[in-house]
Image: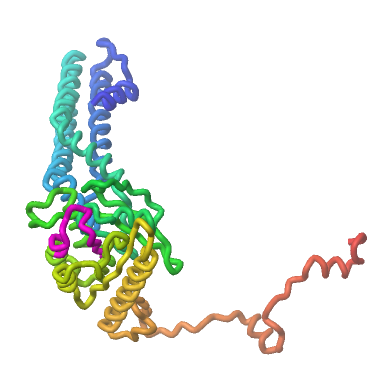
Amino acid sequence: IDVVLSKTQRQTPTVVHKQYAIGRIRSFYMRKVKYTQQAYEEKIARILDEFPRLNDVHPFYADLMNVLYDRDHYKLALGQLNMARGLIDRIGKDYLRLLKFGDSLYRCKQLKRAALGRMCTLMKKLKSSLEYLEQVRQHLARLPSIDPNTRTLLVCGFPNVGKSSFMNKVTRADVEVQPYAFTTKSLFVGHCDYKYLRWQVIDTPGILDHSLEERNTIEMQSVTALVHLKAAVLYFIDLSEVCGYSIREQVSLFQNLKPLFEGKPLVVVFNKSDMKTVDQCTPEEQALVKAMEGPNVQFVTCSTLTEEGVSGLKTVACDTLLSHRVSAKEQRATKAGKDAELLAGIHVAMPEARDQVERPPIIPSSVQARAGAGETLKTQRKLQREIQEERGGAGVY
């Protein structure tokens, strides 16, 4: 409000006298009302244009914003701003119409004051919506830049099983690692290189084994990533149970999340192998581990503390995802009825004739005459060195 009013004061004339002609007084105050209305409209339009529309962004970002900021609250705040823009426009037009019939300086001044006052009151009522949108804007600016369509490794599992430690080993990211649960409270993105390709590694917050309705905002971020991102999923399991969760609980969570792993390459990672391996487990625990086997499931053992098997895990996950993406492209190409080897996932545009008229290439007659005489069609340009030799050589030319 202060910005708009001070801008109106600076950008419009400030001196008016009662002895001026009434037409001049009216235009003086009409200009102020009009300028204030336009300034408010520009500010509101800029806010509405720059905030992302949930229907236009990728479903992953739309769901993530719903989890973090509540879709209804977000849409309501933007809707109130949009409505305010229309109301301010109407107020401005109404008072401009009244100002045309102002018969004295005092009356025109009071009409201008009423118009600006009503606009400012309307903006004051939007205070809570604007504060909410400002918090959303600041939080959006801090969100990591995640590309939903690129090659992605998605790390998930119970809290404190070594997800962030793996992330720090294979990427250039620096995620905080602490010996307590829920150190990671949001999605973290790191990048690494494999076979001359850039890979995106996403570290998700820990998920606990309970129903979807009971999960909090931190856990729902992980679930959103699992649902929408076409990635290779790395499910971490701590066999040593140092994380505070038994193997039975970790396997139970795996079974609950299994519908989210459909159609994605899956690698089950037995972390902290320096403390306990699968061979050291009891027969009951080994039976639980065996229950996780499936058509797309691979098992890898590693230790992020000693870095044993970390590079092997990265290689397995990347190779699995690459082969999965290639096979998906081949299937799409086969469905389209094209040769999978040549045109896998490539759309070739074939131009169609617009009519039956023949349009042969036009070759100038001079060029045709030279071609008929057997002359070369290429014009050889003389070099400066050749011209120099013709004209007497160095020191003369």
Q: Position of residue 159 (x, y in %)?
A: 21, 53
Residue 130 occupies quadrant: top left
**Residue 227: horizontal and vertical position, in percent?**
19, 62
Task: Residue at 17%, 25% (x, y): give it.
Answer: 115
Residue at left offset 49%, top offset 84%: 360
Chain part drawn in magenta? 233-251
Q: Is residue 393 visible?
A: yes
For the residue pair 299 and 368, the one nearer the viewer reads as 299
**Above or below, comparing residue 122 to residue 272 in the picture:** above
> How far across and how far down the image is residue 315, in percent?
38, 69
271 over 187 or under it: above or below: below
Instruction: Please give the name of the residue rendered at 16% of the width and 50% of the height, measured from the top-left corner.
Output: 67
Please tell me whether residue 238 belongs to the stretch shown in magenta: yes
Which residue shows up at 54% across the image and 80% down it? 362
The image quadrant that residue 265 belongs to is bottom left
Task: Return the residue nearer the eye: 295 or 115.
Answer: 295
User: Which of the image's four quarters has the N terminus?
Assistant: top left
The quarter of the picture where the C terminus appears is bottom right
Above/below status of 136 relative to 358? above
Is residue 185 part of the magenta span, yes or no?
no
Find residue 309 and report its horizontal and vertical position in percent. Answer: 36, 65
Q: Is residue 292 visible?
A: no
